[in-house]
Image: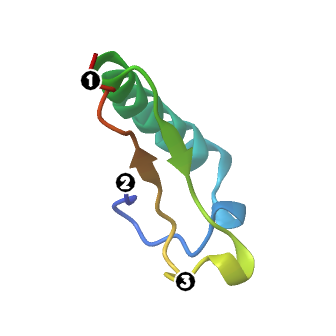
Amino acid sequence: MIPKSHVPSLLETEPAEGAEIARVINEVAAQVLAEYGACRIVTNLGRYQKSKHLHWHVVADHPAEA
């Protein structure tokens, strides 16, 4: 997930922008959770942030086969 406007890092979001980002992440996470049963939301800061544009990874594994 990538915001439409350029934001270098999570630490540089404005409160209103952060609230909108959180709303969208919540919506996507709920959809992934419903389909896969679990997910992780990941973003990086500092030297871990290779891409200097705020973004998140929504990570889910396929459900285990019974």
Number of residues whose C-alpha sits closer than 10 Å to that of mark 2, classed few (under 14), some (14–19) or many (20 or more):
some
Position of the C terminus by quadrant: top left
Residue appearing at x 39%, y 66% in the figure: 5
Q: Give amino acid for label 1.
A: Glu
Q: Position of residue 15 (x, y in %)?
A: 67, 45
- Crowding at dot 3, Cα within 10 Å, few <14 / some 14-19 / many 20+, comes out as few
Q: CA distance from mark 3 to mark 1?
A: 35 Å
Q: Residues within 10 Å of mark 1 (few under 14, many from 20)?
A: few
Q: Which residue is mark 3?
A: 50
Instruction: Residue under label 2, please give it.
Output: 1
Q: Secondary structure at mark 3?
A: loop
Extreme front residue here? 66
Please report whichever mark, 3 or 1, sits nearer to the chain's N-terminal start: 3
Does the residue at mark 2 contact the one at mark 1 (Cβ under 8 Å)?
no
Find numbered disc 1 in the image and state the secondary structure of the residue it sits on: loop
- Horizontal placement of 18 versus 51: left or right? right
Question: Spatial distance from mark 3 to mark 2, Cα to Cα?
Answer: 15 Å
